Amino acid sequence: MNWPAFAIGLLPEHLLLAGVLLLIVHALVARSGQGAAAIALLTVGAAALAALWLALTGFEGEPFIGQVSVSRSTSLGKVVVLSLAWPVLLLARDDLGDGGPFYPLLVSSLYGLALMLSSDSFLTLFLGLELMSLPVYVLVLLGLKRQTSPEAALKYLVLGGAATATLLMGISLLYGHAGMLALVAFPEALARSATATAAAGGGAALAGVVLVLLAFFLKAAIVPFHAWAPDAYEGASLPVTAYMAAIVKAGVLLAALRLFGASSVPGVLVGLVAVLPLASIAWGNLAAMRQPNLRRMMAYSSIAHAGYLFLAFLGDAAGRFTAVWFYLLAYGLMTMLAFSALPAHGDDSRRDRIDELQGLFHRQPFAAIVIGLAMLSLAGIPPLPGFIAKFLIFREVMAAGHTLVAVLGLVGSYLGIYFYLRVIQAMFMGAPAALSGTQGAATLRTPALVASVLCLLPAIVVAVAPGWIFRVL
């Protein structure tokens, strides 16, 4: 162990772990549980600032040689995901109260995510991925405001277990091929698959790569491994849905980015990396058109967006890194913006129904405008960040020589414009829905309003000055 690197490089993880322990002690001591939200906010904020400091100073080190390393890119990843967790915590304070098991579970999940982003071996990658995922299964179950929550949590658990088994089988084959658990075994297997698939060991290397890829496809809800996402998003409480849509997806894609490294996708795997993401784009956008509520619609939207992100892996390493990073930043901000501005409602099952958003502009103008901006950006309408993000993805795919894939992906993206505009039409052009006594005040409550502003301000910066973001990356 490298003690200086352990103490400094893993400072965000140390703070998150300390926060988890403090939240557990607080739950045991304070019977009411009040104050847990403040502890979680301070913990995540301190960890985000620590990661930002490491990124700005360019700190690099290996706390555990061969297992965990810290670089500027890993620290930036932690800054993004931990910063996006702040609006989630504010939404939870507004939606779930100031206490309860939500906060230690969320901070525990963030700890696993941060560890996964620094992993150098399949051992720590698997450990971080499971530490991130296991609390989320419970968080989905905590959304007991809906009758479908237990069923959604069970589906997510079963399919998440299938992803874990698939990943472990792929890792075992790569270990048998390379004789090591270092992540470099994956790009080495990619290179071997490109040149000697039929040679001794080539088949095992290819099978290992395919299984690991399929495990990540399942975690990211790529078609046909997407069945858990709509039910989990709909059955979970709003903060958990926002966390899964923006942060868990970002963690999975950043881990895949670290796994691929500087390697390119060999010709034998181009079909897998192109066809399934294209199917996700088409099916996600088509299925979203018929959804009656925003939460389920966003689930199918996230399936399509996962397809766009995985198409970037067809490009070269440098362009892939920038495209995926910028896309995750823009997508995460806009997804969080849409959920944070969603008006409160006494009946959670009706809160996100599109017919409840009818005439929202006449009741809550700020909420309607903010949700409208998020929808337009997610649809890829210029000059919003979503347009720039999609442009970067398709530019990388075309630069790699996959023009047909880029054209098909672009055509599929046009399908998504319909259901995003459908939400805008309901809010701005629909007749105002009759207010019930449980529907809440005419303005956003303070925590939700703060969460909206925390997402809106950086989104404006990304839209106005994308070049500055590129220089930072």
Image: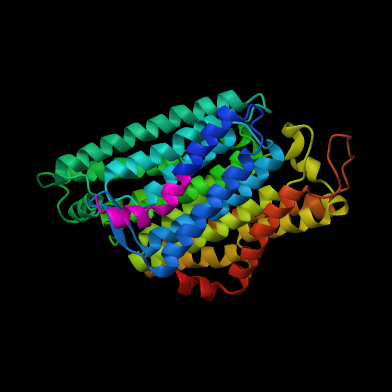
| Residue 300 at x, y percent in the picture | 58, 43
Q: Which residues are magenta?
A: 1-16
Left or right, 50 with reference to 332: left
Q: Nearer the viewer, residue 161 or 53?
A: 53
Query: Which residue: 78% across, 54% down?
Result: 368
Q: Is residue 2 magenta?
A: yes
| Residue 226 at x, y percent in the picture | 49, 38
| In the depicted structure, whether residue 382 falls above or below residue 308 | below
Query: Which residue: 75% across, 54% down?
Result: 424
Left or right, 99 with reference to 252: right
Q: Is residue 371 magenta?
A: no
Query: Which residue: 70% across, 38% down?
Result: 95
| In the depicted structure, whether residue 154 falls above or below residue 431 | above
| Residue 164 at x, y percent in the picture | 36, 34
Q: Nearer the viewer, residue 139 or 293?
A: 139
Mainly helix, strand or loop, the magenta region?
A: helix
Query: Which residue: 45% across, 37% down?
Result: 133
| Residue 446 at x, y percent in the picture | 76, 49
- Asked whether the viewer can see residue 315, the reply is yes
| In the depicted structure, whether residue 412 falls above or below residue 466 | above
Point out the image quarter for the C terminus: bottom left
Where residue 421 sits, quadrant-wise, is bottom right
Where residue 169 sits, quadrant-wise, is top left
